[in-house]
Image (cartoon, rainbow, N blue to C red):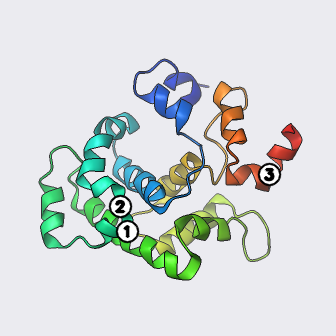
Amino acid sequence: MTTYCLTARDHPIHGPYHDTEYGFPLASDDALFERLVLEINQAGLSWLTILRKRDAFRAAYDGFSVDRVAEYGDAKRARLMSDVGIVRNRLKVNAAIENARRIRALRDTHGGFDAWLRAHLRDEGGAVRDRDAWRRLFKRTFVFTGGEIVNEFLVSTGYVPGAHAADCPVFESVLAAAPAWGFLSGARQRRA
C-alpha cells in the first residue's frame, strides 16, 4: 500500500512538509488556525494545490492571526473573494472568519485552542476520544468541519496518530516532539 510517507519522499513540496510539519504538535492559536484553514480549503482539492498556495493564504489571512481574521467584515471578505492566489470559495472564506471568532471565544472558556483540544483528548468517561467523537465535537464547535477535515487536522497537528508509518524515519522525530497522542497511547513509555 502506498502511503504519504512513501509518496512525499523526494517531492519538492510534499517532502519538506512531510519531514518537518506533518504530525508534529502545534500549540499556538495562530498555528492551529492556519492548519484548520488549510485543511478546510483542501476539501475537494489536492493537498499539493493547498501547499502551493500556502504563502498566498498566509498573506491573505494576515499571517493567520486569529485576532485579525476574527475582526474581518464585508470589505475583507470581498478582498478574499477576489484574491486569485487563494481558494475563492465563499463557504470556505466564511468558515475561516467564523472559526477565528470561535477560536477566540475558546480563550474565554479554555485558555485557547490547544487547551480546548487537550481538554477533549479524553471523553467524559476518561477514555481516549475516538475519531467519531472528535468529529461530533468539531461539528458542534466549528463550521465547515466534516469528518475528513477534522481527521486530517487532528492527525496533521499531532492530536491523534496516523501521520507517519512506524517505519518512517520521521516517526521518531514526531514522537520526540511529544504529540498529544504519544502520551495517551503510551508510545513514549514503550519507546523510552
Please name the residue that numbered disc 3 is placed on: 185
Q: CA distance from mark 3 to mark 2?
A: 32 Å
The answer to whether residue 1 is above or below residue 80 is: above
Q: Residue 165: percent from the left, percent from the top?
A: 67, 32
Quarter of the image with the N terminus is top right
**Quadrant assignment, res 105:** bottom left
171 sits to left or right of 24: right
Q: Secondary structure at mark 2?
A: loop
Q: CA distance from mark 2 to mark 1?
A: 8 Å
- The amino acid beneath tag 1 is Ala
**Quadrant assignment, res 129:** bottom right
Query: Which of these two is toward me, 68 or 33?
Result: 68
Please name the residue that numbered disc 2 is placed on: 65
Quarter of the image with the C terminus is top right
Rendered residue at 31%/35% (across/down): 52
Circle nearer the N terminus (3, 2) = 2
Rendered residue at 46%/60% (across/down): 146
The answer to whether residue 55 is above or below residue 77 is: above
Let me know if residue 165 appears in the view: no
